[in-house]
Image (cartoon, rainbow, N blue to C red):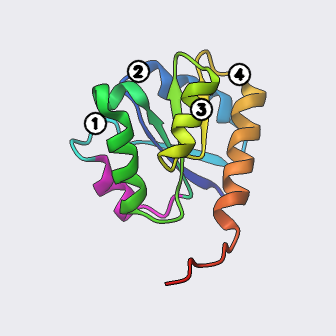
Amino acid sequence: MQKIPLLIVTSHTEDVEELKSILRETPWELTDASHLEDPSAALKGAAVPILLFDRDSAGACWQVTMRRLIKTRRGVCVVLLSSVADQYLWDEVVQHGGFDLLTRPFRKEQVLSTLMFAYAHSKTPWPKAAN
């Protein structure tokens, strides 16, 4: 089975182990880039379709960091990790270019369905905007 790479940036060290456990025996391979000072450098050098990004890892300005990460690598689907979820937060994620929201505690069914949808979305050849 060919592995599909995922990149995670989180300030919650338990996220990595919990998600690795959920993703065991699936096609997903999680790489932790949380230790890097600039996660956009890891994103530039990695052929990953999905970035899992913890809103707490960017401090109060997660929106700015998310936009920067998206600009670093067009076509990557950024999924925000959060301990809270509401319609306002999800709307804000989408308004800032993010793909979706995963909330703690992570549920296997939600994680896998979000990843499959994001992966399919990343492979869709969307029309280019007219100049």
Mark 3 / mark 4, whichever is N-terminal: 3
Magenta region: 39-48
| Foreground residue among 27 and 88 | 88
Q: Which amino acid does label 2 sit on?
A: His
Tags 3 and 2 touching, CB below 8 Å: no
In the picture, measured across the screen, residue 93 lies left or right of residue 110, that is: left
Circle 3 crowding by C-alpha within 10 Å: few under 14, some 14–19, many from 20: some
**Secondary structure under the numbered disc 4 in the rendered image:** loop
Tags 1 and 4 touching, CB below 8 Å: no
Residue drawn 29% across the image and 26% down it: 59
Q: Is 104 included in the stretch rendered in magenta?
A: no
In the picture, measured across the screen, residue 43 lies left or right of residue 27, that is: left
| Foreground residue among 120 and 61 | 61
Alpha carbons under labels 3 and 4: distance apart: 17 Å
Pinpoint residue 40: horizontal percent, then vertical percent: 31, 53
The disc at residue 35 is 1
Query: Which picture quadrant has residue 19?
Result: top right
Pinpoint residue 79: horizontal percent, then vertical percent: 55, 41
Alpha carbons under labels 3 and 1: distance apart: 26 Å
Q: What residue type is labelled 4?
A: Arg
Residue drawn 62% across the image and 55% down it: 4
Residue drawn 66% across the image and 72% down it: 126
Name the residue that disc number 3 marks: 90
Name the residue that disc number 2 marks: 12
**Secondary structure under the numbered disc 2 in the rendered image:** loop
